[in-house]
Image (cartoon, grey):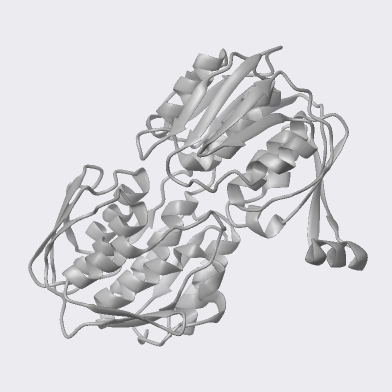
């Protein structure tokens, strides 16, 4: 086990290149199950979720090669092997195996997925979609059993806008007989990315990126080559870090259109932001920022995945800011850790109320989930003294080469191995 240490208070400067989108990768890799020949996905992030999914595809018989940032998947010898336990429980996005395996094999057994602990994130909309397509779904001993004699297209209205359910139903429907219509579908860029891959494989999909997606089932899908989109959440994290502690920062390999809600909030706070075709320029490190109110919404609204990092940035704002998360009500575990560092924040219901400006102080803190980890890294860069972050298994899930990228910008950041005593203390905490 490792800890991350950051000596804060340094101004950063330079350029950082954004990796491929984590939230696309975790759906694109399971989607390869649906093909009959080799699929290549280029530009994947080097994160633990990708490596776990590679191993899961190998468990069911896939021939998988991961070379640097490209994955080659030959799914021709895959079988519908049950995956009730083990690696499948290590990441929440393992639920995409349900849609992909149901679509190809008409059956699947998948353990209830794990990942970040963000409170209840039910998969009832996924199950509703599978049942509408003709599958029976049961929960037996902590695993989801999906069975269908055949899948038939259906009209499915999602009661809640859900990225996961939208993608999972797409995966199950592309090989179903007839037409499927998903209404109240999510519009996130990652859904368009998955639809682009499936279309390249031979699927017939219209409307991805709108709230109505139409799918005409086909008999077979074949291999293809696909380049993943840039990670808008990683890009947003570095934009927030740039606003907090960088004199000048260029965020490279980004689609500015995907970042509009964050750009608008940063400009409202008084941060200078410029965009070009695939870069965003941040002139940060202002003496003080203006307070703002932020409310997370489904895309194209402000992303819930940037709620925690921007909370850290708002400790620099002069006055009171309110951050409301309408997506995940329990996503405030970072607040207690920021308080350890001197932040003036209180949580009321679905909102955190941040009073600034506050000069943060280095402390020992723990990342409770992926984006909480990002907020603590930002806090460590802002703080006086040394910050020590544990719970790095969460950060490893979503940020590739984090220390290297920040070090290249001038940050003092490094990893150390935890002692046996520190591991014992963490396990007892």
Q: Nearer the viewer, residue 365 or 99?
A: 365
**Residue 310: x, y in percent?**
58, 31
Please report the residue visible at 19 percent of the width from the left and 62 percent of the height from the top. 203
**Residue 289: x, y in percent?**
63, 14
- Residue at the extreme front: 348
Please report the residue visible at 54 percent of the width from the left and 48 percent of the height from the top. 330
With respect to residue 358, does 327 lie above or below? below
**Residue 401: x, y in percent?**
66, 49
Please report the residue visible at 61 percent of the width from the left and 32 percent of the height from the top. 311
Q: Is residue 313 left or right of residue 340?
A: left
The tally of labels here is 0
Residue 224 appears in view: no
Q: Is residue 240 left or right of residue 34?
A: right
Q: Quadrant of the C terminus?
A: bottom right
With respect to residue 211, does 195 lie above or below? below
**Residue 300: x, y in percent?**
35, 34
Q: Quadrant of the N terminus?
A: bottom right
Q: Is residue 388 left or right of residue 26?
A: right
Q: Nearer the viewer, residue 44 or 302?
A: 302
Q: Is residue 384 left or right of residue 229?
A: right
Residue 99, picture quadrant:
bottom left
Please report the residue visible at 75 percent of the width from the left and 29 percent of the height from the top. 382
Residue 255 appears in view: yes
């Amino acid at each position: 086990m490792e800890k991350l240490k950051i000596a804060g208070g340094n101004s950063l400067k330079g350029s950082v290149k954004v990796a491929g989108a984590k939230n696309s990768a975790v759906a694109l890799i399971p989607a390869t199950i649906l093909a009959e020949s080799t699929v290549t996905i280029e530009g994947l992030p080097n994160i633990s979720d990708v490596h776990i999914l590679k191993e899961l595809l190998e468990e069911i018989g896939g021939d998988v090669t991961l070379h640097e940032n490209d994955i080659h998947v030959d799914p021709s010898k895959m079988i519908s092997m049950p995956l009730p336990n083990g690696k499948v429980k290590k990441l929440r996005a393992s639920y995409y195996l349900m849609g992909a395996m149901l679509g190809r094999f008409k059956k699947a057994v998948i353990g209830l997925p794990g990942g970040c602990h963000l409170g209840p994130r039910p998969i009832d909309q996924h199950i509703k979609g599978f049942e509408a397509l003709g599958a029976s779904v049961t929960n037996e001993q902590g695993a989801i059993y999906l069975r269908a004699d055949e899948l038939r297209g259906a009209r499915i209205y999602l009661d809640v806008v859900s990225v996961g359910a939208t993608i999972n139903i797409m995966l199950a429907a592309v090989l179903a007989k007839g037409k499927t219509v998903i209404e109240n579908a999510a519009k996130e860029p990652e859904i368009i990315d998955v639809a682009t891959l499936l279309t390249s494989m031979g699927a017939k999909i219209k409307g991805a990126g709108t709230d109505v997606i139409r799918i005409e089932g086909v008999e077979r899908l074949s291999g293809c080559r696909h380049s993943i989109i840039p990670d808008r959440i990683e890009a947003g994290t570095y934009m927030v870090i740039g606003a907090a502690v960088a004199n000048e920062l260029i965020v490279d390999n980004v689609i500015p259109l995907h970042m509009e809600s964050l750009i608008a909030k940063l400009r409202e706070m008084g941060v200078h932001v410029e965009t070009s075709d695939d870069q965003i320029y941040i002139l940060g490190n202002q003496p003080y920022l203006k307070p703002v109110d932020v409310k997370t919404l489904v895309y194209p609204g402000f992303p819930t995945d940037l709620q925690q990092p921007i909370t850290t940035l708002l400790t620099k704002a002069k006055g009171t800011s309110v951050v409301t998360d309408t997506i995940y009500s329990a996503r405030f575990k970072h607040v207690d850790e920021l308080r350890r560092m001197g932040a003036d924040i209180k949580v009321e219901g679905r909102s955190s109320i941040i009073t600034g400006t506050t000069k943060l102080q280095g402390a020992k803190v723990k990342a409770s989930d992926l984006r909480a980890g990002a907020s603590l890294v930002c806090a460590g860069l802002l703080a006086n003294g040394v910050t020590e972050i544990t719970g790095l298994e969460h950060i490893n899930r979503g940020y590739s080469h984090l220390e290297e990228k920040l070090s290249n910008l001038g940050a003092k950041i490094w990893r150390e191995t935890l002692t046996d005593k520190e591991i014992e203390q963490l396990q007892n905490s």
